[in-house]
Image (cartoon, helix red, strand yellow):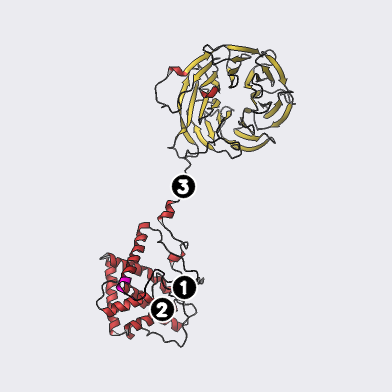
Amino acid sequence: MRSKRVRSLLGRSLELNGAVEPSEGAPRAPPGPAGLSGGESLLVKQIEEQIKRNAAGKDGKERLGGSVLGQIPFLQNCEDEDSDEDDELDSVQHKKQRVKLPSKALVPEMEDEDEEDDSEDAINEFDFLGSGEDGEGAPDPRRCTVDGSPHELESRRVKLQGILADLRDVDGLSPKVTGPPPGTPQPRPHEDVFIMDTIGGGEVSLGDLADLTVTNDNDLSCDLSDSKDAFKKTWNPKFTLRSHYDGIRSLAFHHSQSALLTASEDGTLKLWNLQKAVTAKKNAALDVEPIHAFRAHRGPVLAVAMGSNSEYCYSGGADACIHSWKIPDLSMDPYDGYDPSVLSHVLEGHGDAVWGLAFSPTSQRLASCSADGTVRIWDPSSSSPACLCTFPTASEHGIPTSVAFTSTEPAHIVASFRSGDTVLYDMEVGSALLTLESRGSSGPTQINQVVSHPNQPLTITAHDDRGIRFLDNRTGKPVHSMVAHLDAVTCLAVDPNGAFLMSGSHDCSLRLWSLDNKTCVQEITAHRKKHEEAIHAVACHPSKALIASAGADALAKVFV
């Protein structure tokens, strides 16, 4: 009789939870506890004693029952809004009974077999953990039998303990839940939904969290592989080189490694290994410490050029000297002792500051231009380097500012001048071949740098009048002319594939130009002004996706 009574009470509870709408003629449960029998009063007393023990937390199984009871009060809001006032009065009694009966079912200490049968029947009829959120009482797929055997009860209790253990282990995350079966109707907007059913609908586990990764701005594993499409991208600052005490005048990349050489007005050259970044500072532009400082000049270092296979480098300064240096091992300790063999030779011959240097790997020759009004050709690989050829330019063109080897004719060099002239020279003949028409319509303006296209007989010049001009080495005629910056254009660099041109200016900006249509594809503000000067040098890596700039603010920046 008691089991039938419990089933009838639970059946009424499920009807109120939304599975079946109660009919007016259906029998209703007694409105209060007074209608219960003596055995049921004893059952209620035992459940109340168990709740007190659960609150005190005497053992693990009692905490399990208390944890489950804490999840049940959500059923208090599950009555249908369409019910009349009499049904609401009856539902209050049913909800009280629903809260108490399952807790008794979870208590392992049973005093008689009848009460145990009633509790097992209650679990079979009302397994809220396995039911759908609509309260239809759908069977739990985890339940394999319905005979109410003690083995089944124990297996369900172990599974419940495992779920609660997962809740504690995840430390605040929701336990693993499985969405409702495909045929289960979805709740109406006005119905309350069990909170565990609203978390994503899928399984949540630490395995999913372990798969998550966070991008670290300080990660040095950037793609430095060479590619023809390397310049068809947006360049972002990656390294900031902070070690010089005065403006940086010139840059040169290592031919094959991620290393950079800088020449500064503080009288030193410094070698930077970009693979040895200091990751302590968590900012977008990482700091790199120099691995070696070259000290021999007695004044500002104004120009630098990398030798064949980056075994040697050459520097020219305001002291009118050109120094030949042996590149040390890139993996060296920066705190090692000084090695005197690093300084190889000193090339003497100029009478004033050396403003520009260029090295030709094909002819193994070094070209220099000086404020003394001469352009000189050197053989730096000989045991006693000497000047091979001198081009006097002061009388006809003025003071040279920059020099470069042409790519199509290894025996030809091109030099630019303060007067705005650009002259093509033949090293073998030892005379000028052609004067290029580099002066603009507005009059002669100083040319700050000249570069040669790597694949075409084309010379590109940077002018003080904010313009860039493209000149044909065969005819001397201008191919294209454009206003490129808001201030004087100070430096140029062409990528190894000849597709893009990079320019720097005293307007503090770097600009990347497409050589196909002569349009700007990216502008970067990288340096600050100092004494009305900003960017002094730019460079492109010969084999890797790296570009660099240097300025009067004593900083060099590398972009990837």
Horizontal side of residue 50 vs 268, given as left or right: left
> Which residue carries the number 3 mark?
214
**Displayed quadrant of residue 354:** top right
What is the quadrant of the N terminus in the image? bottom left
Secondary-structure class at tag 3: loop
Q: State the image coordinates of residue 155 (x, y, percent, origin top left).
A: 33, 68
Q: Main secondary structure of the magenta part?
A: loop
Calculate the distance from the C-alpha at mark 1 to the C-alpha at mark 3.
39 Å
What is the quadrant of the C terminus in the image?
top right
Q: Tag 3 or tag 1, which sits nearer the N-term?
A: 1
Residue 332 in sight in this render: yes
Task: Based on the picture, tell me whether residue 148 belongs to the magenta stretch.
Answer: yes
Residue density around tag 2, few if under 14, some if 14–19, many if 20 or more, within 10 Å: many
Q: Earlier in the sequence, mark 2 or mark 3?
A: 2
Residues under numbered marks 2 and 1 in contact, where contact means CB atoms less than 8 Å apart? no
The stretch of residues the image draws in magenta is: 138-153
Amino acid type, mark 3: Val
The residue singled out by tag 2 in the image is 13
Q: Which label sits on residue 173?
A: none
Label 2: element kind: helix
Out of 308 and 358, give the one closest to the viewer: 308
The amino acid type of the residue labelled 2 equals Ser
Residue 187 position in % (x across, y down): 49, 71
Residue displayed at 50% across by 69% down:
182
| 302 shown above or below 153 | above
Q: Residue 384 vs residue 523: left or right?
A: left
Residue type indicated by callout 1: Asp
Q: Is residue 218 above or below residue 533?
A: below
Find numbered disc 1 in the image and state the secondary structure of the residue it sits on. Answer: loop
